[in-house]
Image: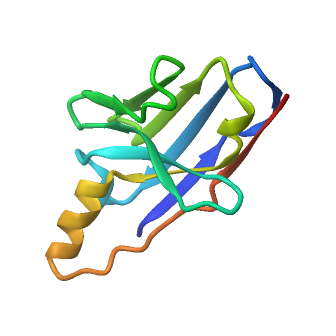
Amino acid sequence: QVQLVESGGGLVQAGGSLRLSCTASGSIFRGNHMGWYRQAPGKERELVAAITSGGTTDYADSVKGRFTISRDNVENKVYLQMNSLKPEDTGVYYCNLDPAAIAAVNLMGHHYDYWGQGTQVTVSS
């Protein structure tokens, strides 16, 4: 069974920090590349950070130097440490397979559309 549960969001002042956690249940996540996505009000969901199964990371320019993604492959958890938060970081944050991994699943004939409920992050100015 595929399940994604995000937590750790909240209301924080600009310059503050939050640490998001994600529990990914299901064999599809084991050893696969993962990412954190953000959906701001009125905007499309965007990838902000990604991590390979081996721990190599990549970040959107808007969060580089402020956010750190990490994972625990034993517990099937993914984390996002967010520092120096800005009002433009406000949105609902989701974890999931990274876009390349989703595309690979779809190439095998599946229609991958599993998303958790997300966790709301609100940064006040």
121 w.r.t. 55: above or below: below
Q: Percent x, y for residue 48?
A: 46, 40
Q: Percent x, y for residue 70?
A: 41, 28
Where on the picture, by quarter, is residue 104? bottom left
86 w.r.t. 31: above or below: above
Judge left or right: residue 42 versus residue 5.
right
- Total of numbered circles in the picture? 0
Seen at 25% across and 27% down, the residue is 56
Q: Percent x, y for residue 35?
A: 40, 45
Judge left or right: residue 29 versus residue 96.
left
Quarter that holds the C terminus = top right
110 vs 57, nearest the viewer: 57
90 w.r.t. 62: above or below: below
Q: Percent x, y for residue 21?
A: 57, 37
Seen at 54% across and 19% down, the residue is 66
Residue 8 seen: no
116 vs 86, nearest the viewer: 86
Quarter that holds the N terminus = bottom left
Where on the picture, by quarter, is residue 53? top left
107 vs 66, nearest the viewer: 66
Seen at 23% across and 74% down, the residue is 106
Where on the picture, by quarter, is residue 25? bottom left
Judge left or right: residue 24 versus residue 108.
right
